[in-house]
Image: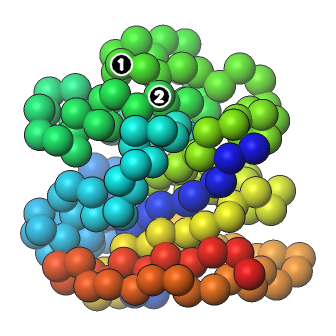
């Protein structure tokens, strides 16, 4: 099994719901209000992971990204279009709208355990929560924005036992801070 890396936009008070406003929530758009320099390009410093790894996305994130990236030709978008994508969904039956996308065949946890490449889970809080339950996330890369949202879904929920992480990097990225944590 490769390394499993969860990446997410997070509000200062720990929420991950609707950072771009596309969900239509009353508090949505909290990350994107800080401008494109805070959210555009390879802000999570994925680098070679986009060449050698695989993305794991839930349905909503896949639908959002499949409407954005195929029409773009910048370097980051080209890599996002090229990387293999595993889509965890019980509703979707066709993922041909975005190149290199494949529906997860069977159980997501088993698919991650079988994957030899590094897996980057992006934006899909339900998938992240599932992998957290099975202690499969090795690393978090969080872009934390100076917005207090007050509602929505949190990245970390209740847990039966503490999870200890080590901060391995912290850098300012526009208005946000990128922090990288690994399992201790």
**Among the 4 quarters of the image, the one containing residue 172:** bottom left
How far is mark 2 from mark 1, CA to CA?
A: 8 Å
Find residue 117 and name its label: none
Front one among 154 and 26:
154
Other residues around mark 1 within 10 Å, as few (<14) / some (14–19) / many (≥20): some
Q: Is residue 2 left or right of residue 27?
A: right
Residue found 36% across the figure and 63% down from its top: 44
Give the x, y percent position of residue 170. Answer: 40, 86
Vertical comparison of 75 with 147: above or below:
above
Residue found 68% across the figure and 83% down from its top: 165
Give the x, y percent position of residue 166. Answer: 63, 86
Vertical comparison of 30 with 53: above or below:
below
Residue found 81% across the figure and 76% down from its top: 159
Residue found 53% across the figure and 83% down from its top: 168
Q: Is residue 131 left or right of residue 173?
A: right
Which corner quadrant holds the N terminus? top right
Find residue 99 and name its label: 1
Which corner quadrant holds the C terminus? bottom right
Other residues around mark 2 within 10 Å, as few (<14) / some (14–19) / many (≥20): many
Q: Is residue 68 left or right of residue 16?
A: left
**Among the 4 quarters of the image, the one containing residue 32:** bottom left
Q: Secondary structure at mark 1?
A: loop
> Label 2: which residue?
84
């Amino acid at each position: 099994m490769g390394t499993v890396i969860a990446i997410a936009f997070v509000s200062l008070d720990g929420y991950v719901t609707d950072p771009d406003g596309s969900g239509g929530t009353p508090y949505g758009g909290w990350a994107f209000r800080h401008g494109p320099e805070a959210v555009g390009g390879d802000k999570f410093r994925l680098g070679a992971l986009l060449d050698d790894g695989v993305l794991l996305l839930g349905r909503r994130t896949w639908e959002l990204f499949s409407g954005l990236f195929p029409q773009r030709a910048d370097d980051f978008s080209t890599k996002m279009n090229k990387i293999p994508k595993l889509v965890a969904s019980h509703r979707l039956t066709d993922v041909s709208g975005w190149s290199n996308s494949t529906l997860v065949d069977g159980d997501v946890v088993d698919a991650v355990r079988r994957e030899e490449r590094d897996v980057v889970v992006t934006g899909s809080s339900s998938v992240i929560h599932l992998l957290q339950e099975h202690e499969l996330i090795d690393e978090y890369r969080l872009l934390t924005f100076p917005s207090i949202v007050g509602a929505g879904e949190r990245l970390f929920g209740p847990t039966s036992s503490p999870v200890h992480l080590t901060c391995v990097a912290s850098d300012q990225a526009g208005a946000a801070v990128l922090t990288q944590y690994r399992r201790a």
